[in-house]
Structure formats: structure tokens, C-alpha cells
Amino acid sequence: MMLSQSEKERYNRHIIMHGFGEEGQAKLKNAKVLVVGAGGLGCPVMQYLVAAGVGTIGIVDGDVVSLSNLQRQVLYTESEVGQSKAGLSGAKMKQLNSAVDIHVYNRYLTSDFADELFPGYDVVVGCTDNYESRHIIDANSKRHNIPFVHGSICGFEGQLCVFNYNNSYSYADIFGSEPANLSSPVGVVGAIPGIIGSMMAMETIKIVTGIGQVLANRLLLYDALKNSFSQLPF
């Protein structure tokens, strides 16, 4: 798919990079990425992918904005408390880049819905803090041979990995096949999802364009208190 003159201007800072060029931008334009969760991680993921020119973005979230979300979910405002996250984020992403095809799914992910939805996308990005949803994403991305970009956050820490990429390890292979049960929400510093979410967007761009080494079979760990990164190979 060729780029228009307007697109060449808009994505100039991509196109002028050695090894990226118009070919890399065209791959982004042709890509379809599903973002599951429009919260702390989902906000930066959506914003950077839409700004980057990913052609189709799907947003899955059945939740509404709460006051406690605003400490880290910087896409939303006080006046939007009580409104649909999927609906709000979809509308704002369309304002950010009107050329991107935005699909809003104002519902929670179930196994049946994932089985129906995933074949229409090239990559699924898991931005949920729900362990059951992560296992649904993992099982269905593996079934449909779609890479699963995973991120999670807690306190001053975050982690990142790409599962089910070219026969790499799955989430269940590393964390077990049974979802964990959390009795209460965990605390997190508001900037952490911005850091991890930005890296999740970067991994998605690498998968789509074929540029760089994808973070598969390695778990990246970030410690904000030490400002350090480490990797655990599988």
C-alpha cells in the first residue's frame, strides 16, 4: 500500500531513518493491532501506535473511568469519570489520527469473544491487570498464531515480554496455566505504566515492521527505584 504525500510528511521522522523508510511505514499502515485494556498501559500503547500510523486499531475494554484511574491513566479527565474507557479512547484516538481505522469493543474479553475477534488482527497487546484475561489472550493468540505483547506493572516495577512469536514461549509456559487470584488492587506509581506501555508499543512496531530483535523468550524487568533493567532468558 503506497503512502500519500500527506502521509510522507506526517511520518517523515520515521521515513528518514535508515532501515525504516517508506517500506516500514507502509507495513505499519497495513497492520491491524488489537489492544486489550484501555487503562494505565493501554493509554500510552494506543497513543503511540495511533500516532505511528498503524492502520487499524481495535480497543477492548468494558470498564468505565473512575477517579482513582486518573493518577496513571492520563488519557482521561475528571469530567469523564463514569464514562466508557473504550468509547472515550476510541474517540480521542480518532482525533489524534483520523486516517487510522478505530474499532471499539465496549465489553470485557471472554474466551469465545477472543476466538471470534483475534483472527482479524496481526498482533494483540495485553494491557490488562486481570490474570484471567491474560490467559484468555495467551491461549487464543497461540491458537490463531498471533504474537502477544505482554506488560504488567506493580509498585515501582514493571515487566515486558512477547509471547507466541514464531513459536516462542507462551505466557502459560512461564507463569503457569491457572490464573492467579488477587483479592485487592495493587499499588503502582503513575509513571510506571507510561514507561512500560511505551516499550510495549515499541515491541509492537518491531513485530509489524520486522526491524530489530523482538523481546521473545526473554522477560524484561524494570526497577524504577534503581532505574535499572534486567532480562531473564527462558
Image (cartoon, rainbow, N blue to C red):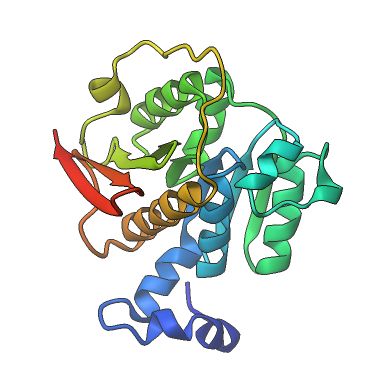
Is residue 170 toward the left or the right of residue 232 in the image?
right
Q: Is residue 11 above or below residue 234?
A: below
The residue at 49%/44% (across/down) is: 121
Can residue 65 be seen? Answer: no
Above-or-below relation of 115 to 17? above
Residue that appears at 30% across and 42% down: 162
Vertically, is 177 above or below 24? above
Give the side of residue 212 with respect to residue 92, left or right: left
Question: Residue extending furthest left?
Answer: 233
Q: Is residue 170 above or below residue 124?
A: above
Give the image location of residue 181, x and y in percent.
Answer: 47, 11
Residue at image location 75% in from the left, 36% down from the top? 66
Quarter occupied by residue 110: top right
Residue 66 visible from this viewpoint = yes
Q: How far from the left and from the top, in percent, is residue 163?
A: 30, 36
Residue found farthest to the front: 225
* Of the pair 7 and 224, the residue shown nearer to us: 224
- The quarter of the picture where the C terminus appears is top left
User: Is 169 in front, or is 159?
Assistant: 159
Q: Tell which residue pokes out farthest to the right in this image.
A: 79
Marks counted in the figure total 0
Could you tell me residue 116's position as x and y percent?
Answer: 55, 28
Q: Residue at x 42, y 21 (%)?
A: 135
Q: Position of residue 144 (x, y in %)?
A: 39, 32
